[in-house]
Amino acid sequence: MGNIFHGERVRLRGVEESDFEHYFAWEQDTDGSRMDYEIWFPTSTTSRREWVQSQARVTGEGDTFRFTIATLDAVVVGSLNTHTVNRRNGTFSYGFFIDANHRRKGYASDALRILFRYFFHERGYQKVNAEVFAFNEPSMRMHEHFGFTLEGRLRRMIFTQGQHHDALIYGMTREEFETKHL
């Protein structure tokens, strides 16, 4: 018997309180934080622990959820979350972070295949959107290789390292996903 949240390289699972050390360490990765969303003020271990505990209690209400990405032999390698969920239109967005020591090993692509298969085939969504910062070339390449279409560019939307950068909007329909990945 299979598990829909298991892929070829990784599995998606809920956040556990024991994941605290990973999430706290990832927060210390300035370059990773910049590419993921933004560099936040340093938080205390107490604050980060409370946040992880709150994430461990999330049930996926409204199809917004944070997954921990772990290899099939249980090594935690990253995080994946859904957001900007619109059930009426059948669209959703996501964000992910892969630990610097585990990048370029296919973990992100495998995690996305699992997530999209679930959202398209079990939750009834018809399109996924992603925002990628124009300075994040590895993410741009990954999305394009995965089969996303560049649908637009929002100019000067992100400020980091003393300058403004564009945000690139990628999209993939259910049919495009199925053609490339099933």
Image (tube, grey):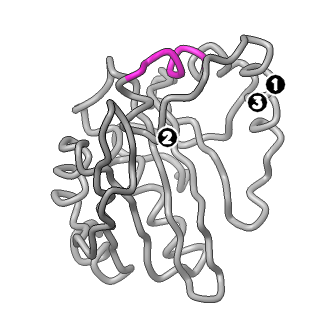
- Residue 51 numbered mark, or none: 3
Q: Where is residue 137 in the image (x, y as percent from the top left)?
A: 18, 44
Looking at marks 3 and 2 on the same chain, the residue that comes earlier in the sequence is marked by: 2
- Cα–Cα span, label 1 and label 3: 4 Å
Taking the spot 43% from the left edge, 18% from the top edge, the residue there is 29
Quarter placement of the C terminus: bottom left
Closer to us: 5 or 90: 90
Q: Where is residue 120 in the image (x, y as percent from the top left)?
A: 49, 75
Q: Can residue 71 be seen in this view?
A: no
Q: 127 above or below 51?
A: below
Closer to us: 30 or 114: 30
Q: What element carries label 3?
A: helix
Closer to us: 117 or 8: 117
> Callout 1, which amino acid?
Glu
Res 46 quadrant in image: top right
Q: Residue furthest bottom?
A: 88
Taking the spot 72% from the left edge, 11% from the top edge, the residue there is 45
Q: Where is residue 62 in the image (x, y as percent from the top left)?
A: 74, 67
- Residue 29 highlighted magenta (yes or no): yes
Q: Is mark 2 on a helix, strand or loop?
A: strand
> Marks 1 and 3: CB-CB under 8 Å?
yes
Q: Give the range drawn in magenta.
A: 24-30
Q: Position of residue 173 (x, y in %)?
A: 36, 80
> Callout 3, which amino acid?
Trp
- Cα–Cα span, label 1 and label 2: 24 Å
> Which residue lies under the disc numbered 2?
11
> Which residue lies under the disc numbered 1?
50
Q: 103 above or below 109?
A: above
- Residue 71 highlighted magenta (yes or no): no
Q: What element carries label 1?
A: helix
